[in-house]
Amino acid sequence: MLETTSLSLLFIVLFILLLLSAFFSSSETALMSLNKYRLRHLEQEGHSGAIRAGQLLARPDRLIGLILLGNNFVNILASAIATIIGVKLYGENGIVIATFTLTLVVLLFAEVTPKTLAALHPERVAFPASFVLKPLLFLLYPLVWIINIITNRLLALFGVSSEDVSTAAINSEELRMALKEAGSLIPQRHKKMLMSILDLEKVTVNDVMVPRNEMEGLDLNESISDIIKHLSHCGFTRLPIYEDNMDSIVGILHVRKALHFLAQDNLNKDNLRSIIKRAYFVPENTPLNTQLIQFQRHRRRTGLVVDEYGDILGLITLEDIFREIVGEFTDDLIDEDKDIHPQQDGSYLINGSANIREINRNNHWNLPTEGPKTINGLILEYLESIPSPGVSLRIEDYVIEVVQTADNVIRTVRISQAANSTERD
């Protein structure tokens, strides 16, 4: 029958088959290239094309079976028609000519070009294509079903099941990469906050707590006049209450409640004890994301960090965790930072007790945070002895000079970035 068909009609049919081949090729690439999270979002908004595409992708074995069935059918039929055209035009030599010509045409116009377009603009191709593929799947379902039965049996030989469809889960590292590649779609400040939230699992309470030697508390065994004086000049909303020393913690005092008694001239130790809340203890090395949930669960804002022996190591507050997420709450906090003093030569005089993470955050540095939490501890770990003033050392890209020591601790250091690291930056 095809041998008696006119050449013009054969060329028209061949052209239509090439268009169908391009359609199936581009549809496959577009549907497989769709952003699964944007697709879910569009489905929730009721986008009809996204809904149909999602339904097709729910069973990728059926979708691939349908597309390959259609694509192979039109390609084989196009090959037969091209062979007939070649024979009519060039005789037996036309078979070879038709084969090479059709291969080139299919490769350029039915494979590479449509698939490239689909990869670059998957939604523009996939959503319209889904309106054709969905009813086509319904019409050809018996044939697709038979093909899937055969292919699924073959896959089963390799221990693969078609039911094992990816759940499209994303881990924290993939989410970090997605945030980095979001570009201007997400404001830079919001991006930093989201990255900080993801990093909470890598930071422990030890990294952000107020060390024990810097904790401010209230000794309940002091005279009531000294207690009143302390409360009147207190700059914190909550204070640890102890008897004689920090090892004998009584609880946590909300200073505002004590000031209420003070305003009524009715502050005494009995009233003070009545408003002290039982202390809440936090194990050391607790990740910040876990501690944030614990604060919420226990309805607390302050916790005392303890080691495995129950000794108090420091104080952690809800504000400390929030600061890890959003940074300092006001510029005043940065301006009042007494630990870091910039110098005219570009170096910084820094207190030895300064927290390394705070220094990195304020100066945009990358001092090592694994291990010691303070500059004093970092230097002692590297030198394994208490250095004398004037001793200098280099840790990664930073030159550190010991300026002052006292009472077996390093009081002040001078830190500057090494010259070669500055040039590299």
Image: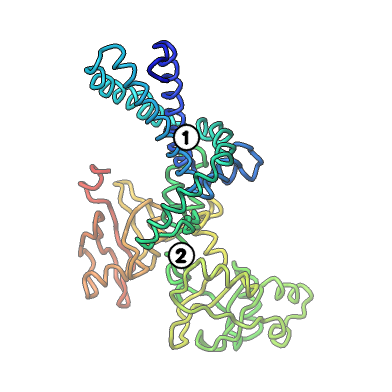
- Relative to 60, is 413 above or below? below
Camera sees residue 351: yes
Q: Position of residue 237 (x, y in %)?
A: 63, 69
Q: For numbered disc 2, what is the local secondary structure?
A: helix
Cα distance between the residues tagged 1 and 2:
41 Å
Amino acid type at circle 2 is: Glu
Q: Residue at horizontal 44%, vertical 39%?
A: 69
Q: Which callout, 1 or 2, points to the residue nearer the camera? A: 1
Q: Of the residues shown, which amino acid type is indicated by label 1?
A: Ser
Q: Secondary structure at mark 1?
A: helix
For this rendering, which residue is in front, 354 or 295? 295
Residue at image point 40% right, 28% down: 77
Residue 398 location (% of width, % of height): 26, 55
Name the residue that disc number 2 marks: 201
Quadrant assignment, res 366: bottom left
Task: Report the disc number at residue 206.
Answer: none
| Residue 378 position within the rendered picture, expressed as x and y whole percent measured from the top left | 30, 68
Estimate the x, y position of residue 41 in percent, counting from the top left: 59, 44
**Residue drawn at the location 46% of the way across and 52% of the way down:** 175
Mark 1, other Cα within 10 Å: few <14 / some 14–19 / many ≥20? many
* Residue drawn 40% across the image and 35% down it: 72
Pick the front one: 215 or 176: 176
Q: Nearer the viewer, residue 150 or 407?
A: 150
Marks 1 and 2: CB-CB under 8 Å?
Answer: no
